[in-house]
Image (tube, rainbow, N blue to C red):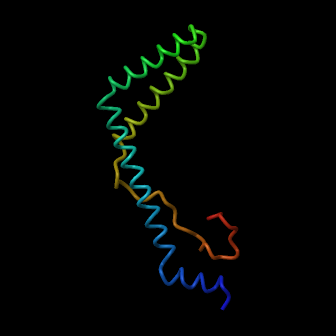
Amino acid sequence: MAFGEQLKHKADEVHLQEKAKDFGDAVVEMAKAVMSAAAGYAQENRGKVDEALDKAEGIVEEKTNGKHTETVTKVRASVDKGIDKLVDQRETVSPSQGPSTVPDDRHSAFDEQSPAGNPT
């Protein structure tokens, strides 16, 4: 038996594909929990976040003598929009809600017909 065949047999024997899928699902759940926590912090401390952003905006304005006011204003608007979106998503998605977003594998890592590193 060739080395590749032995490796595939062992991977099948220890259910490597299923374990990789379970790990991917766990990572997705952890990411959802982190996003929810960050959104919660942003929502609960929006005043503090705004104060910190105002202070940073003021420092940039002061250090550049207002040279980059337009850019600073655009960046601040983008940051505010991102925080709002994060908070809105927290209200619609929570950890453990809905099916996993990790797709099922269509190929084994040992399939010779599938290009390396390409799961599709």
User: Looking at this rendering, what residue extends furthest in the front direction?
Assistant: 63
Q: Nearer the viewer, residue 86 or 110?
A: 110
The residue sitting at 48% across, 27% down in the picture is 79
Quadrant of the snapshot with the C terminus: bottom right
Q: Residue at x 32, y 32 (%)?
A: 43
Expressed as whole percent of the image width and height from the top left, the position of residue 34 reads: 38, 46
91 or 3, nearer to the observer:
3
Taking the spot 37% from the left edge, 39% from the top edge, the residue there is 38
Instruction: Depth check: give the residue in front, 93 or 7.
Output: 7
Residue 65 in picture, x, y percent from top left: 57, 7
The image shows residue 52, relative to residue 65, as above or below, that is below
Residue 112 is left or right of residue 34, and the answer is right
Q: Is residue 62 above or below residue 96?
A: above
The foreground one among 43 and 56 is 56
> Residue 42: where, in percent of width, then height?
35, 32
The number of callouts visible is: 0
- Residue 49 is situated, as x and y percent measured from the top left of the image, at 37, 26
**Which residue is painted at 41% across and 30% down in the image?**
84
Quarter-of-image position of residue 2: bottom right
Quadrant where the N terminus is found in the figure:
bottom right
**Quarter of the figure with residue 7:** bottom right
- Vertical placement of 57 versus 32: above or below? above
Residue sitting at the far left = 44
Q: Residue furthest top?
A: 65
Image position of 33 with respect to 100: above or below:
above
